[in-house]
Image (cartoon, grey):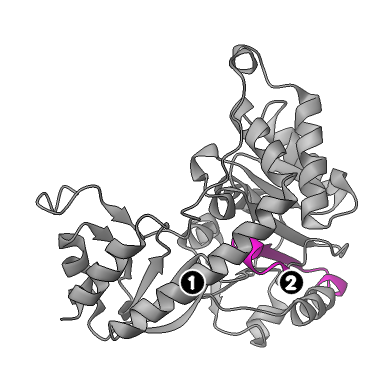
């Protein structure tokens, strides 16, 4: 906004993978903000989330103040010197493991992926939307677990592709991360979950202390994860909106080559020139230093869709 002071306001922020039509339930009541959060509410939230994730034992789930906080804690909890990251990958993972000089692997069949002490991947992947099927991932995790190796699966975007999730698997040395803010459209709540074995869960709870979440995170999480109807409706709307977005991008001469129903991974031969033209129109997308032919584009809301169409049609003219 500082760089483009003459751009139309308000800005249309498409740089994230956040549902633009958030869950609209109740926040915490005023009296809940005047006391420390109730540990019983935390346990209830973990139980409700377990049901939503298909996890039978809620003791395996630890609520955390955002998946980002969890991924930063994991390097201090997991043993093993050889770390592999399935790239491209969300930059936070690379930063978290930088102290162990992680190896980058482009495919999960790479020997470095199978033999690393710790393998980290995102499914569906951020930023390109790469997917690993449940069956293939379960087989890989089982193989690695039998060899005493950790596998960390970041499922921050899996709510729009629940068939991919491995959260329900009870395999040793599998850790699954889940995010609340992306699918439910409320990233400011700072809520996420770690799903692992009971030993890891206990270690995490000691690190986080008695009150890891605020009252709003507890209230919103309890309401949203119990709302099965909203979840099904949101998935259907996001899928339909994604199809509409792809049609607009195609009309504008932009090719969708990946993504999921929360963001699109678009091939743009001159992405570093298109990006500032969009900024000049008050539309923020996500460019990549090492990808001059790619933009990541989030979904607009219903109210912003016409503006989205007009801006992208003009951007390629």
- Residue 102 shows up from this direction: no
Image location of residue 191, percent across then percent down: 61, 42
Magenta range is: 145-162
Residue drawn at x 76%, y 82% is 136
The residue pinned by badge 2 equals 163
Is 277 rendered above or below residue 2? below
Is 278 rendered above or below residue 272? above
Taking depth in this image into account, of 310 and 87 the one nearest to the observer is 310
Mark 1 and mark 2: span between their CA atoms? 18 Å
Query: In this rendering, would 298 be left or right of 68?
Result: left
Query: In this rendering, would 26 be left or right of 193?
Result: left
User: Are circles 1 and 2 on residues that touch, CB within 8 Å?
Assistant: no
**Mark 1 vs 2, N-terminal side:** 2
The residue pinned by badge 1 equals 242
Residue drawn at x 62%, y 48% is 70
Taking depth in this image into account, of 27 and 144 the one nearest to the observer is 27
Image location of residue 110, percent across then percent down: 64, 87
- Quadrant location of residue 217? top right
Taking depth in this image into account, of 199 and 25 the one nearest to the observer is 25
Residue drawn at x 26%, y 73% is 312
Q: Residues within 10 Å of mark 1 (few under 14, many from 20)?
A: many
Image location of residue 98, percent across then percent down: 50, 60
């Amino acid at each position: 906004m500082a760089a483009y002071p003459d751009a139309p306001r308000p800005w249309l922020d498409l740089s994230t993978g956040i549902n633009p039509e958030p869950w609209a339930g109740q926040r915490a009541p005023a009296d809940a903000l005047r006391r420390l959060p109730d540990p019983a509410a935390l346990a209830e939230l973990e139980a409700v989330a377990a049901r939503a994730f298909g996890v039978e034992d809620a003791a395996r789930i630890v609520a955390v103040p955002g998946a980002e906080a969890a991924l930063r804690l994991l390097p201090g909890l997991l043993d093993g010197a050889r770390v592999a990251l399935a790239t491209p990958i969300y930059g936070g993972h690379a930063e978290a493991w930088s102290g162990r000089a992680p190896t980058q692997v482009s495919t999960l069949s790479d020997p470095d992926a199978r033999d690393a002490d710790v393998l980290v991947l995102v499914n569906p992947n951020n930023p390109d939307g790469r997917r690993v099927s449940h069956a293939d991932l379960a087989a890989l995790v089982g193989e690695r677990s039998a060899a005493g190796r950790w596998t960390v699966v970041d499922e921050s975007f899996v709510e729009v592709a629940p068939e991919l999730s491995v959260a329900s698997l009870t395999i040793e040395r599998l850790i699954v991360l889940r995010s609340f803010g992306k699918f439910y459209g409320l990233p400011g709540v700072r809520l996420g979950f770690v799903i692992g074995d009971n030993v890891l869960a206990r270690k995490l709870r000691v690190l986080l202390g008695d009150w890891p979440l605020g009252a709003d995170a507890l209230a919103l999480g309890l309401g949203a994860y119990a709302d099965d109807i909203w979840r099904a409706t949101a998935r259907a709307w996001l899928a339909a909106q994604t199809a509409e977005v792809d049609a607009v991008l195609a009309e504008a001469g932009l090719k969708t080559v990946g993504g999921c129903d929360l963001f699109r991974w678009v091939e743009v031969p001159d992405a570093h020139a298109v990006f500032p033209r969009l900024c000049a129109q008050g539309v923020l997308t996500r460019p990549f230093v090492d990808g001059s032919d790619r933009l990541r584009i989030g979904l607009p809301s219903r109210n912003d869709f016409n503006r989205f169409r007009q801006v992208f049609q003009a951007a390629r003219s």
